[in-house]
Image (cartoon, rainbow, N blue to C red):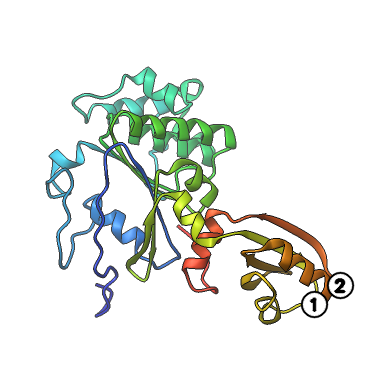
């Protein structure tokens, strides 16, 4: 509860083995609270949270989970090798040290002190700590923040490996292209409720058609009445139109706005589809 207002309301979420689930929504949607309840960092005021049919705060449940949080510090004086070895010792059937370091792209940094690492390297160490215990549930909060693209791709491959061997993965990310590429299932939250729960392809289909972006004098109110237009809004200096008939919309744009420039047409993305599910003035953030 936040004061007298529930942060989560009528939330019913089950994570399936072998599935990468992306949890998406605007700030204040309840994603952080959901993850905190699942990982045992919070207890519900009402309702039930079960992890492997156990209370998430129990050691038996936590021992089967790997968690990579967005904000988590590392001890400056330990080397990467020492820290990963320490965490590996907490688990009954962990990966070998060399395998963990290799999967996280840390083999060449093993003898570096954590206090000397860059932001992206710190994220890789946090990833190693989450994966070292062979988790049956892998929880990742903004996993590729501060990572370069090569490191991010390596992480994606490992995440898919967890799911392919039968583990469950819960991912939160502000990068909806990442969620689209990685997730088998997308759960969209708003106002403490689930507003969509489906495959990325099925959610993309809700946006329908194409997205047109351009610059000119036309207002969103006028653009939304163009042939084929489903919705229109400004994004910075650009006009963004979701259209079910891009050709008809573009022809009308060209006829009605002689100042039109920077015209681009693309298929609707997951971000477009989620924007259509939420109020037009609310931005997606993990």
**Residue that extends furthest to the right in the rendered view of this protein:** 258
Q: Is residue 41 above or below residue 167?
A: below
Residue in the foreground of this view, choosing between 235 and 263? 263
170 on left or right of 221:
left
Q: Earlier in the sequence, mark 2 or mark 1?
A: 1
Q: Residue at x 80, y 77 (%)?
A: 217
The quadrant of the picture occupied by the N terminus is: bottom left
Residue 234 falls left or right of residue 83: right
Q: Which residue is mark 1?
A: 217
Residue occupying the point 58% across, 36% down: 149
Q: Quadrant of the C terminus?
A: bottom left
Label 2 Cα crowd, 10 Å radius (few <14 / some 14-19 / many 20+): few
Identify the residue at horizontal 67%, vertical 79% (top origin). Answer: 225
Q: Which mark is residue 259?
A: 2
Task: Give the alpha-carbon distance from disc 2 to disc 1, as whole Å.
Answer: 7 Å
Q: Nearer the viewer, residue 263 or 32?
A: 263
The reply to whether dot 2 and dot 1 touch (C-beta < 8 Å) is yes
Height in image: 157 above or below 61? Answer: above
Residue 86 seen in the current view:
yes
């Amino acid at each position: 509860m936040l004061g007298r207002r529930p942060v989560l309301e009528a939330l019913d979420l089950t994570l399936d083995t072998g599935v990468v689930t992306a949890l998406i929504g605007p700030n204040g949607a309840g994603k952080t609270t959901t993850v905190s309840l699942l990982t045992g960092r919070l207890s519900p005021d009402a309702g039930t949270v079960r992890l492997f049919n156990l209370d998430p705060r129990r050691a038996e449940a936590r021992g089967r989970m790997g968690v990579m949080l967005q904000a988590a510090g590392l001890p400056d004086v330990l080397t990467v090798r020492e820290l990963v070895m320490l965490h590996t010792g907490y688990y009954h059937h962990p990966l070998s040290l060399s395998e963990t370091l290799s999967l996280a792209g840390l083999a060449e940094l093993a003898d570096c002190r954590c206090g000397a690492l860059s932001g992206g390297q710190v994220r890789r160490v946090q990833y190693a700590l989450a994966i070292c215990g062979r988790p049956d549930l892998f929880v990742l909060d903004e996993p590729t923040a501060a990572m370069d693209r090569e490191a991010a791709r390596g992480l994606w491959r490992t995440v898919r490996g967890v799911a392919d061997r039968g583990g469950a993965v819960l991912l939160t990310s502000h990068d909806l292209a990442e969620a689209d590429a990685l997730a088998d299932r997308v759960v969209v939250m708003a106002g403490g409720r689930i507003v969509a729960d489906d495959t990325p392809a099925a959610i993309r289909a809700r946006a329908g058609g194409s997205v047109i972006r351009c610059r000119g004098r036309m207002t969103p109110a006028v653009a939304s009445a163009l042939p084929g237009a489903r919705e229109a809004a400004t994004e910075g200096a650009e006009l963004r139109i979701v259209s079910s008939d891009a050709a008809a919309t573009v022809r009308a744009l060209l006829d009605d706005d002689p100042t039109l420039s920077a015209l681009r047409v693309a298929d609707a993305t997951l971000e477009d589809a989620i924007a259509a599910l939420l109020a037009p003035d609310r931005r997606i953030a993990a």
